[in-house]
Image (spheres, rainbow, N blue to C red):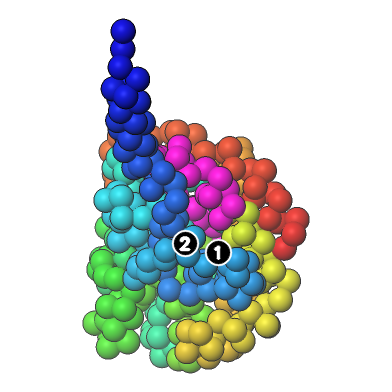
Amino acid sequence: MSNPLILRRRSLLLGAAAATLAMPHLARAQSPLRVGDQRGNARAVMEAAGVLKDLEGRIVWSEFPAAAPLVEALNADAIDTGLVGDAPFTFGAAAGVPIKAIAATRENRDGLAILVPKDSPVQSLQDLKGKRIATGRGSIGHQLVLAALENAKLPLDAVQMVFLLPADAKAAYSSGAVDAWSTWEPYVAQEEVTNGARRVANGAGITPGLGFQAARNDAIASRRPELADFVRRLATARAWANANPAGYARTWSALMNIPEPVAELWFRRAQTRVVPIDDGVVTDEQKNIDLYTRARLVRTTVKAADLLDPSFAEAIQAGNKTG
């Protein structure tokens, strides 16, 4: 006959063991969502729109100088999700980073441009043959150079690309160490407004104008409600900013210490919006992949549909309705 005291102790021990095994899962579920950002991007618009007020302690932000190190952080499991351009997302996913895009952004591409100083003799892309263009390796600026050369029926070696992070690219461009700078907002608007820079090429009509909210595959599996809530709020914030470009420009310029006219030019020109992963996004992302494949920057067979997760569409649509 079993001793009731022994049975009780055994039951307590088994219960404690089960609780111990469950602890990592509970700790993970209760820990903040780790979100990567680039300065003045998602966090700035979400704070300005007031959609983060009830999330204190539920998000931990990490700021990166460009998309490439943000993708590296996703690969290292240092963050759960982050917003990046289509080029760095594609290169990262193609290289095996365990991520998928759970939302897309679309924006007008006039603000993705190859800039030259106002007094430069360069008047067109043709005039840049044999010259040096600064941009970020694997960035949307890199994408623009490839697309612009292809569109102009020029070989990929018609220009010399100098790969630098934005701060170093700006320094090289400002000092005359390079002839042009292929970059994105707010750098384009800032150079135009403050220094009279000229755009000799831009992304309108030759690049899709996509960005992606990338998330680690394990975060998609374990943190789906939090990710859905995040993209819903991001969609709401972007819709608010598009409806209030002047007001958002005032808030953003004060936060970033950048002149208000720079911010307003960017926001009115870009009209950035968050959209679900749909057939149009898949088609445009496949065009990106094909461009990089022709340039031999992607050397494996990659299908856009395998990199994109359309299952957050309902959350994004709900956010756009309340923006």
Percent across and percent down for residue 206 are: 52, 56
Q: Would residue 280 be visible to someone looking at this image?
A: no
Residue depicted at x 69% and y 64%: 239
Q: Is residue 135 above or below residue 15?
A: below
Q: Closer to the camera, 149 or 192? A: 192
Q: Tell me the residue that label 2 is attached to.
A: 59
Q: Which quadrant does the N terminus fall into?
A: top left
Q: Residue furthest top?
A: 1
Q: Is residue 190 above or below residue 267?
A: below
Q: Which quadrant does the C terminus fall into?
A: bottom right
**Which disc, if any, is residue 305?**
none
Q: Closer to the camera, 16 or 200? A: 16
Secondary element at image label 1: loop
Residue depicted at x 31% and y 55%: 78
Q: Tell me the residue that label 1 is attached to.
A: 55
Q: Which residues are magenta?
A: 204-230
Q: Is residue 229 magenta?
A: yes
Q: Closer to the camera, 290 or 99? A: 99
The Cα–Cα distance between marks 2 and 1, rounded to whole angstroms, is: 7 Å
Q: Amino acid at mark 2?
A: Ile
Q: Give neighbour class at mark 2: few <14, some 14-19, many 20+ (Cα, 10 Å).
A: some
The answer to whether 164 appears left or right of 196 in the picture is: left
Q: Is residue 186 above or below residue 20?
A: below
Residues under numbered marks 2 and 1 in contact, where contact means CB atoms less than 8 Å apart: yes
